Image: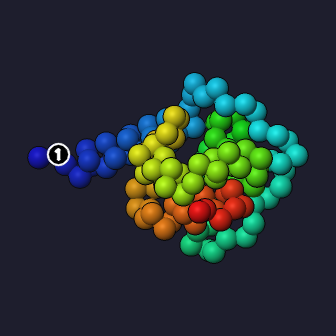
Amino acid sequence: MASIQTRLSLTLTLTATMLLAACGGGSSAPAQSTAAAATPPPAAAPAVMKIYEQTCHNCHSMPASGAPQAGDKNAWAPRVAQGRDTLIDHSINGYKSMPPMGTCTACTEDDFVALIEYMSGAKLK
């Protein structure tokens, strides 16, 4: 049976790997528009902001990641048009460079809806 220190080390290694993979490569997404990227996203509930800062922020505030940037309505519009079910599926199961659960293993479907609505500035349908 693995020691607590060994399990902790493995957990930290897996978390770091997921974060690197989440922002990592190979995305051929076009650069986000600078005007839209400069617009801060709308205010969100403190619980949503806490999750965003701990997980989503790592990629959705870094243009080089290829992820749609929080507050960039132009980048989010075609994604939001795909509908709630598709975006939730991508959040939970992963999509392109985004890892499953977006590194938020404790997030619920409602959390993902709130996070997407916060970052996109749009209500999901």
* Residue 47 visible in the current orientation: yes
Question: What is the image's colouring?
Answer: rainbow
Q: Residue at x 40, y 62 (%)?
A: 106
- The percent position of residue 50, horizontal first and vertical second, equals 58, 66
Quadrant of the rendered image containing residue 71: bottom right
Q: Residue at x 64, y 41 (%)?
A: 67
- The percent position of residue 17, horizontal first and vertical second, equals 44, 37
Is 78 left or right of 94, judged from the image as shown? Answer: right
Closer-to-camera residue (100/117): 117
Is 57 left or right of 38, judged from the image as shown? Answer: left
Q: Residue at x 40, y 56 (%)?
A: 105
Q: Is residue 26 above or below residue 19?
A: above
* Residue 102 visible in the current orientation: no
Query: Which residue is the site of mark 1?
Result: 2
Numbered-mark total: 1
Query: Secondary structure under badge 1?
Result: loop
In this view, which residue lies farthest toward the right?
35
Is 106 left or right of 87, judged from the image as shown? Answer: left
What amino acid is labelled 1 in the image? Ala
State the quadrant of the C terminus: bottom right
Q: Is residue 54 above or below residue 93?
A: below
- The percent position of residue 100, horizontal first and vertical second, equals 42, 45
Closer-to-camera residue (24/113): 113
Q: Is residue 24 above or below residue 116?
A: above
In this view, which residue lies farthest toward the left?
1
Is 75 left or right of 91, judged from the image as shown? Answer: right
Closer-to-camera residue (19/38): 38
Q: Residue at x 73, y 70 (%)?
A: 43
- The percent position of residue 26, horizontal first and vertical second, equals 57, 24
Q: Alpha-carbon neighbours of circle 1 within 10 Å: few (<14), some, or many (≥20)? A: few
